[in-house]
Image (cartoon, rainbow, N blue to C red):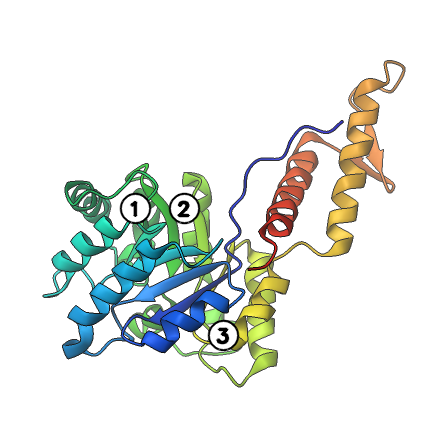
Amino acid sequence: MSEPTSVFTPLRSVLYMPSSNERALEKAKTIACDGLILDLEDAVAPDAKPAAREAAAAAAASGEYGRRTVTIRVNGIGTQWHDDDIVAASQAGPAAIVVPKVNSADEVARLVAAMEKAGAPDHTVLWAMVETPVAILSALEIARASQRLGAFVLGTNDLVKELYAEHVPGRAPILPSLHTALLAGRAAGIAVIDGVYNDVKDTDGFLAECEQGRQMGFDGKTLIHPGQVEGANVAFAPSEQAVEDARGLIAAWDDARRDPGGAAGVVTHNGRMVENLHVESARRTLAIHESIQALGTD
């Protein structure tokens, strides 16, 4: 028997929803995304922010979103709404509080302290948006700043703007920044979620960027339209072939370990030598697959 796989929370598709839109919050209960970001920032007009705050807190505390990972994105540090947003979000107890433009380990520490002062339950973690040059250059320090930091969320639109770069297919201008954030996130053991794709009508371009993100190592992608959910879910899930290969590789490894007459330390599968690092990767593939299968539908 293979060793049990670890618990894994899928974050293939994380959809931004404006908290000022009651219909959007209701519709979100039926969308097959892995995660929701109930937005109080960019998607909400200034005069609508107080009401949106109340709506997001009520939605996050309702328990009506099934297996979805429900988070609240607050307004940024230093804005007139930030402190009240942190208090309301903390008391609502979502899976995470998403904070834009987190630029330093000190900011992480202050955010965590504010969450704890406001009474955030233990399960509510911080998701830091990485979207400025200084954040990229400080990524490892930010990622390791607190045990309560659960994820990086890439803000690629702001990053492109701050770099004076351009949005181009393949994202060459920001690839070094994406890799740096991934390196830091993996070193710290947190999730790393890719940025949005802006053209909701360009399905081919969106799917190509999902495939690129999966190949790079992202856990999933943030989305701006429900029509992008299915593509992200497929792209960031292990394929049937990958699952079959993972099971076969683990079985070959376990069989060899049980065979006292086998060649010491030498295991092959489909003509390739298998080492422990391959087994670890296979187990992660199965953990992701099994967690997705356990989600079912609601």
**Is residue 116 or residue 183 the one in the foreground?**
116
Residue at label 3? Answer: 226
Q: CA distance from mark 2 to mark 3?
A: 30 Å
Taking the image as shown, residue 89 lies to the left or right of residue 224, namely: left
Residue at x 23%, y 49% (from the top left corner)? 90
Is residue 253 visible in the rendered structure shown here?
yes
The label on residue 184 is 2
Up the image or down, 41 lies above or below 239; here it is below
Looking at the image, is mark 2 or mark 3 earlier in the sequence? 2
Q: Residues within 10 Å of mark 2 (few under 14, many from 20)?
A: many
Residues tagged 3 and 1 counted as in contact (Cβ below 8 A): no
Up the image or down, 189 lies above or below 204; here it is above
Residue 94: percent from left, percent from top: 33, 51
Residue at x 28%, y 41% (from the top left corner)? 121
Residue at label 1? Answer: 142
Q: Residues within 10 Å of mark 1 (few under 14, many from 20)?
A: many
Residue 11: percent from left, percent from top: 50, 55
Residue 247: percent from left, percent from top: 77, 40
Up the image or down, 15 lies above or below 6; here it is below
Residues tagged 1 and 2 counted as in contact (Cβ below 8 A): yes
Give the number of the mark in front: 2 or 3. Answer: 3
